[in-house]
Image (spheres, helix red, strand yellow):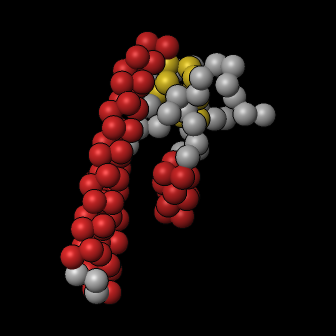
Amino acid sequence: MKKSICVVCKKEKKGRRVEEDLYLEAIRKIKTRLGIAKNNTLVVCDDCIPKAKEKRRRFERTLATWAILATLLFVMLVVISQTLQSIFFSLVAAVVFILFSLLSYFPRVEEHGRKKG
Ligand SMILES: [Zn+2]
């Protein structure tokens, strides 16, 4: 049977589900391949909702900041030295920036009355 685990306090609790996204899907695929997937349902319990929303806001801010930095770096390198190497380098930097922002990753909590399907 599937357990529902709160992603904030890690306790087995009922609560609102978190939205599946590319990041969660990727992690699940990796875990399934490694054979360590627990197949728990990820939720946020009522006690942790404010904390979860704050964490999600922080992640979205971080992601936006790194995205802007990556774009600026890309534009600068392309304008200054129009070589393939610099374009390649800025793409690598952009990926590194995105990985940095994923360090503070937190899933979005599903809102009531806004569910798909
Ligand atoms: Zn909790």
Query: Which residue is drawn at the image coordinates 27% and 74% (left, top)?
Result: 79
Q: Looking at the picture, does residue 3 appear above or below residue 89?
A: above
| Image quadrant in which the N terminus is located | top right
Q: Residue furthest front?
A: 79
User: On the image, which quarter does residue 39 sit in?
Assistant: top right
User: On the image, which quarter does residue 117 sit in?
Assistant: top right
Query: Which residue is drawn at the image coordinates 21% and 76% (left, top)?
Result: 80
Image mark count: 0
Let me know if residue 105 appears in the view.
yes
Q: Position of residue 9 (x, y in %)?
A: 38, 24
Q: Residue furthest bottom?
A: 84
Q: Position of residue 61 (x, y in %)?
A: 33, 38
Query: Which of these two is toward me, 21 or 26?
Result: 21
Q: Is residue 60 left or right of residue 17?
A: left
Q: Position of residue 11 (x, y in %)?
A: 44, 24
User: On the image, which quarter does residue 95 sit in?
Assistant: bottom left
Q: Residue furthest top?
A: 47
Q: Is residue 21 left or right of residue 11?
A: right
Q: Is residue 51 left or right of residue 108?
A: left
Q: Looking at the picture, does residue 87 appear above or below residue 12?
A: below
Query: Which residue is drawn at the image coordinates 55% and 59% (left, top)?
Result: 29
Q: Is residue 23 left or right of residue 86?
A: right
Let me know if residue 10 appears in the view.
no
Q: Looking at the picture, does residue 14 appear above or below residue 107?
A: above
Q: Looking at the picture, does residue 24 appear above or below residue 42?
A: below
Q: Position of residue 90 (x, y in %)?
A: 29, 72
Query: Which residue is drawn at the image coordinates 32% and 78% (left, top)?
Result: 87
